[in-house]
Amino acid sequence: ARKRFCVFEKPGYAERLRDLSRLREIRDMLPLSVSRAQLAGTEELRELACTIHVVNHVGCSFSCAENDSYLSLYKCWGLDSRLSKESRSSAIVEAMSRDRTRLASDSPALMKAWQAEAIDW
């Protein structure tokens, strides 16, 4: 996998992201946001699809990675992992797996799910 870097700027914005002194830092980092359950290891950390990185406070002295916002979008469970033998016995897990595997990596349903997640964020 390789990283792709895209810049979207608010139209008419006075401070351009490309002119920032921290552009190299932003371009070279790979931020990853995880839930508490993923961090604790109680929820699977699925394959990363992308991370949306919002640069906050552009042009201010306190503009830094710690003050930016991040949303990581992951491939659905079933696209990047298989159920273990122990998990297969659970009817709930099987139903979840069936539902999620219907979302192919390029399906409109997956794009809508990611769009909804970004809007909720």
Image (spheres, grey):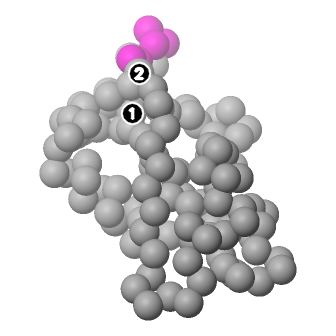
Q: Quadrant of residue 37?
A: top right
Toward the right, the furthest residue is 61
The answer to whether 7 appears left or right of 20 in the picture is left
Residue 102, horizontal then vertical, whole percent: 19, 36
The range drawn in magenta is 82-86
> What amino acid is at disc 1?
Trp
47 versus 4 height, above or below: above
Q: Circle 1 sits on which residue?
A: 77
> Residue at position x 55%, y 77% from top?
16
The answer to whether 100 appears left or right of 30 in the picture is left
SS type, badge 1 = loop
Q: Marks 1/2: CA distance? A: 6 Å
Q: Quadrant of the N terminus?
A: top left
Q: Circle 2 sits on which residue?
A: 81
110 versus 81 height, above or below: below
Viewer-side residue, 19 vs 121: 19
> What amino acid is at disc 2?
Ser
Residue 27, horizontal then vertical, whole percent: 60, 50
> Residue at position x 72%, y 66% from top?
21
> Residue at position x 32%, y 63% from top?
115
Viewer-side residue, 93 vs 28: 28
The answer to whether 36 appears left or right of 52 in the picture is right
- Magenta-colored segment: predominant secondary structure: loop
Residue 118, horizontal then vertical, whole percent: 42, 65
Q: Are marks 1 and 2 in contact (CB under 8 Å)?
A: yes
Viewer-side residue, 23 vs 64: 23
